[in-house]
Amino acid sequence: MNRPWWVRPVAVTVALTALVVVFVTTSVVRDRTYAASAAETELLYVPSGEIVERMALSFDSLVADIYWIRVIQYYGGTKRSESVEKNYDLLGPLLDITTTLDPGFKAAYRFGAIFLTESYPNGPGRPDLAVALLEKGIDAMPDRWEYYMDIGFIYYWWLQDYETAGSWFERAAEVPGASWWLRSLAANTLAAGGSLESSRMLWQQVYDSADNNWIRTEAARRLTQLRALDDINQLIALAVRFNRQAGRPPRGWDELIQAGLLARLPLDPTGLPYVLDVENGAMNVSPESELYPLPGESLPPLSQ
Amino acid sequence: MAVITRIAVHVFKESIRDKVLYNLVLFAVLLMGALYLIGQLTAGQDVKVIKDLGLAATQIFGLFIAVFVGIGLVSKEVERRSIYSLLSKPIRRHELILGKYAGLVLALAVNVAVMAVALYLVLGYMSLIESEEFKATWVRPAADPAMLFALFLVFVQLALVTAIALFFSTFSSPSLSAVLTFSLYVVGHFNADLRNFESVVDSSVAVYLARALYYVLPNLAPFDVKAAVVHGEPVSLGYVAMTTWYGAAYVAALLLAAVFIFARRDFK
Amino acid sequence: MSTPAIKLDGLTKDYAVGFWRPRPYRALDQVSLEVASGEVLGYLGPNGAGKTTTLKLLMQLIYPTAGTAEILGRPAGDVGARRRLGYLPELPYFYDNLSAEELLVYFGGLFSLSAADARRRAATLLDRVGLGAARHQRLRRYSKGMLQRVGIAQALINDPEVVFFDEPMSGLDPVGRRDTRELIRQLGAEGRTVFFSSHILSDAEALCSRVAIMAQGKLIATGRIADLAFEVLGWELVVSGGSLDGMRALGLDEATREVDGRLVIELTIDQPPERVLPELARQGAQVVALTPRHESLEDYFMRVVSQPGDAD
């Protein structure tokens, strides 16, 4: 061979790079064009945790992790997507697979329940699925009092079933090692469930006992929402007084200010003004507020 | 070219007679027959189960053939030194690699075809004997031509795995090559999850690394359209074409690397 | 002067030994040698001398660190040259699932022989090496000796001008060795150049016009066997028709053993055959074979390397 020694390796490197570019580009274009990714198709294929468990051989825990990453990606991706119709249908099956593969996967139960209960469009709004998931967690780990409490919480907050909520809090209190305040929470719920006070107490407990930022931030948000509800109650009282004085409901905040009932434009805890609906006198936070929608407002739509 | 063809034919003959391969295919065909019995046990779901298991069996048996015969192509030959006499013949080293690859892909195609025929026969039989009302519940016909898409992509995927096995065996021992090929196969299936790394990891360095790995490592999951086909979801021709093109380019890269390594190697 | 059939010029091969800090191991050191067309050269040396390394470099199974190797005027590895040569590797192994005939037809095809031609040649060659009966059996069933013969056959499928044999006698029983020697002699008589390696001197004895002696990677000596000072340690005499009693009379009974109805007598250097033979003839014994027993190649090297010996 009369060529200098470096010609061949260079030629091979160039050709290899070209081929890599080709297949990478093909991959990118294909992924973009055909959005139905393999993960979703695969999900249709294995709707049950048992089957995946058998297929995962001895790598259950690792595969559970992979599915957990998919849960987060699926939930986050759907939540953040721009489309009008958000479809969370696969969230339940994904969580089922994850927890079947690794029944000890604590985060999957608790966060999974939270994702499932979030009302549409921030989530599928399926408290029933969340309860089922947590019950599965209790089956696997009966000494986790947090799961009992989480179920009680769902009945309280999302399903407004205070009796059932109270009984779950009681059961949670029975578990050895449970927090001391669960018993009083149970009593409070049974007595005055639905009241702002018991709700506030509940969320305050969640905030204090939260072991990570996500839950704590969420609890803080809820507490702020409750403060907004408090504010609105007071504003309603002012409106009633205006009605008695003026013989009709107020048509705007300025009327209340002029009537001397209100010092200035009422702002919600995030600094945005409250909204007064002139037609039916309803008061609410502004739709642009972070606190929107306030609890007890919209019923979560059930998926078809 | 003539040399490559002759080597390919020889490899094909050797492979077809290989006892391991022979037994695997036989077992797969028997399994197809047994599937019918299995299908009887799962009331109502039998067609789907047979299709699922049949396609999966084709893929798994094909995988074993691709890896073990693929490694034998070079690694075992070097270990046993039968390659010495072959290399002293008037052939160029790249002709050897390409010929061996072509021969094995041919053998693979025949094996996949045999298993596909067995599967279709079983499903066709089901079509004949089941009642019309029951058949009305099937989303897709039993002997569904759409399954050919799935089988074709399985074949392309196996051709890619064979190229991986061949590549490793140009420079490592048979056992190491087998381990590396299987590992890459597993990694290739979970490749898609590398892309989702950014949802769970904060470090942008890790995300870029994961992205790069996702694109460079073989992405095998898209070759798997079994579920779609069984559920009657449409598989677009464009998708099949692009995925096949991806496979072809990846195979070309692997063969180029294999030829380069093989050409400069000392055979001690 | 015509081009030599084989030419080695300063051929050197280093291997890196060791994983962490590789040290170079010189397997072949500046070997230069020419083999003329039609010569039968014995490439001799103890195990590890570099004989196989040389052959692999000639076949371009490995690449040289320095120096060149040429076959028929072309560099080693040249495809055109490979059309005209045959190669038998050491301890050959082929493909389990083919038969001997199929193997030869396959290899013949690589030389662009038609299937019919290849089959014809295969049949002839397999008969020549004594495998005619077994030629349809799968190679997996072949013994070591049979594989060796197949190896020889496949080396000749293309009617080569130059033939390279690496330890052609290994794995063969004495009859096989004799047959192979005969084959090599025939190849030489047919005008082919034969280059074969061995670690046994007597293999080369009758066949080679020239030998080249290797040790520790270096070419120590080349020349005719008669010219190289190999020490003769004695003779091996094989007679038929003799008797042990007769041997006792000569004082040779201790040195005699009976093999297959013949007597094999080990004569020492002080018992030259010409003194013994007339006596044996009188006893009615007939000489079957008389072979000098040389010092082993190992002993030769010990002797020559420690003092400057004949070099070519």
Image: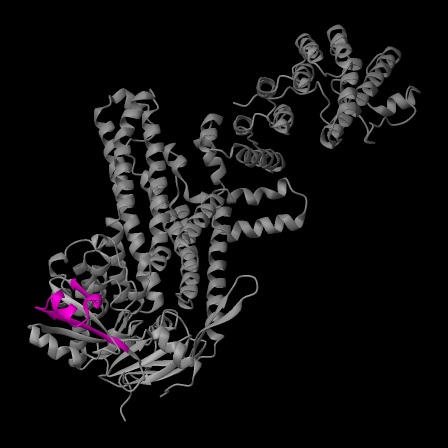
Q: Residue at x 46, y 35 (%)?
A: A42
- Mark yes or no: residue B112 visible: yes
Does the segment drawn in magenta span residue B21? Answer: no
Does the segment drawn in magenta span residue C242? Answer: yes
Q: Residue at x 26, y 91 (%)?
A: C2
* Residue found farthest to the bottom: C1
Point out residue C14 in the picture as x, y percentages from the top left corner.
46, 73
- Mark yes or no: residue A285 visible: no
Vertical placement of C274 versus A146: above or below?
below
Taking the image as shown, residue A78 lies to the left or right of residue B223, namely right
Considering depth in this image, is A59 or A229 the residue closer to the camera? A59
Vertical placement of B176 versus C245: above or below?
above
Taking the image as shown, residue A38 lies to the left or right of residue B203, namely left
Considering depth in this image, is A101 or C165 the residue closer to the camera? C165
Asked which quadrant contains residue C107, the reply is bottom left
The scheme the figure's colours follow is one colour
Point out residue C125 in the picture as x, y percentages from the top left corner.
14, 67
Where does the magenta region start and end?
A: C233-258
Vertical placement of B4 versus C164: above or below?
above
Point out residue A2 in the picture as x, y percentages from the top left corner.
42, 81
Considering depth in this image, is A225 or B226 the residue closer to the camera? B226
Point out residue C297 in the picture as x, y percentages from the top left corner.
34, 74
Q: Quadrant of the C terminus of chain C?
A: bottom left
Taking the image as shown, residue B142 lies to the left or right of residue A112, namely left
Q: Residue at x 67, y 14 (%)?
A: A152
Q: Quadrant of the N terminus of chain C?
A: bottom left
Considering depth in this image, is A91 or C200 the residue closer to the camera? C200
